Image: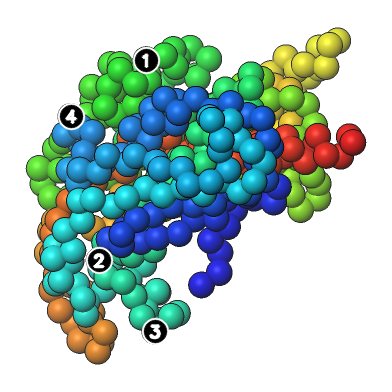
Amino acid sequence: MAGNSFGNIFKLTTFGESHGEAIGGIIDGCPAGLTLDFEAIEADMNRRKPGQSAIVTQRKEPDSVRFLSGIFEGVTTGTPIGFVIENTNQKSKDYSHIQDAYRPSHADYTFDQKYGFRDYRGGGRSSARETASRVAAGAIAKQLLKGITCNAFVSSVGDIYINKPYQDLDFSKTEDTPVRCPDLETAEKMISRIKEIKKDGDTIGGTITCVLKNVPIGLGEPVFDKLHAQLGKAMLSINAVKGFEFGSGFCGTKMKGSEHNDLFNPDGTTKTNLSGGIQGGISNGMDIYFRVAFKPVATIMKAQETIDSQGNVVEMQGRGRHDPCVVPRAVPIVEAMAALVLADFWLLNKLSKL
């Protein structure tokens, strides 16, 4: 099975399954001499972990990271950083009913068709449990990117949106509610909607907006490794993501060039930032902002028709512990993947100047 590594210089390879002994990863290319803040790593892991509020899955996992290599006395050595995150609260029996049946809109059918075998316990390798390893690696990447900030937040749940530009939001309030929306009035509406959906045995989607500040000019490698192209790949690799847009995105298609062009100030900054901080695939020093769309979680607690491995039409209903809305827990995952992209390009820029 290929496709388990991300990045070129700052490279992450992940391993493990949802109901295996553990998940984990190897970070290759992290420079030596970086003093790590383990409390910051733990804080990001706590933001992603299950069971943190009434509006997410109630699976209880501490998601503690145990580092095996590449760190000595709290400082990176420049060698590969190996780490594991134990799985301690699996309930594999919750999935016995889908051993031979395929959940609609899940990876069950495609995995089985591609590999001739699948781990039906929680989706195995296709489970979002794998993203815990990304958050651990992203927390280290954030510490490498001193001065650069990654602020992601839930900007919509279903048809409930924040109707404010990100510049008017106070990112320090993002963690004030379990839905991770910094506009507290909108957050309460989102929470109520998710609770309604959960009570009905259904799920709902939403969007996450991410703002990257203080990104230096010059990150990105045209033509095929444009900065926004790599950010798009990173976001689209996250479970349940169905869309990515940066800057003006699809709304920009409704504008004229005279309205959309970002005119320069004498110092090279721009009067507007519809380009989203990236021009020609290269960061221009302005804020980079983008939006990521998440579909409703595929596993629902309602009965649905599906097929089994023999092609028979059967009825199935979700069991176990699942998120009614994935976006609150996906906020640190979006930040982590953005940090991994920036760390990779930041190191490449350093190497190109040697």
**Chain-order first, disc 2 or disc 4:** 2
Residue located beneath label 2 in the image: 121
Distance of mark 2 from mark 4, alpha carbons?
Answer: 31 Å
Residue located beneath label 1 in the image: 173
Q: Residue at x 56, y 35 (%)?
A: 72
Q: Out of 205 and 93, give the one closest to the viewer.
A: 93
Distance of mark 4 from mark 1, alpha carbons?
Answer: 18 Å
**Chain-order first, disc 2 or disc 3:** 3
Q: Check disc 1 and give the amino acid type.
A: Lys
**Chain-order first, disc 1 or disc 3:** 3
Q: Check disc 3 and give the amino acid type.
A: Gly
Q: Residue at x 73, y 35 (%)?
A: 346
Residue located beneath label 4 in the image: 192
250 sits left or right of 312 in the view: right
Q: Check disc 2 and give the amino acid type.
A: Arg
Q: Residue at x 21, y 76 (%)?
A: 99
Q: Which mark is residue 116?
A: 3
Q: Which mark is residue 214?
A: none
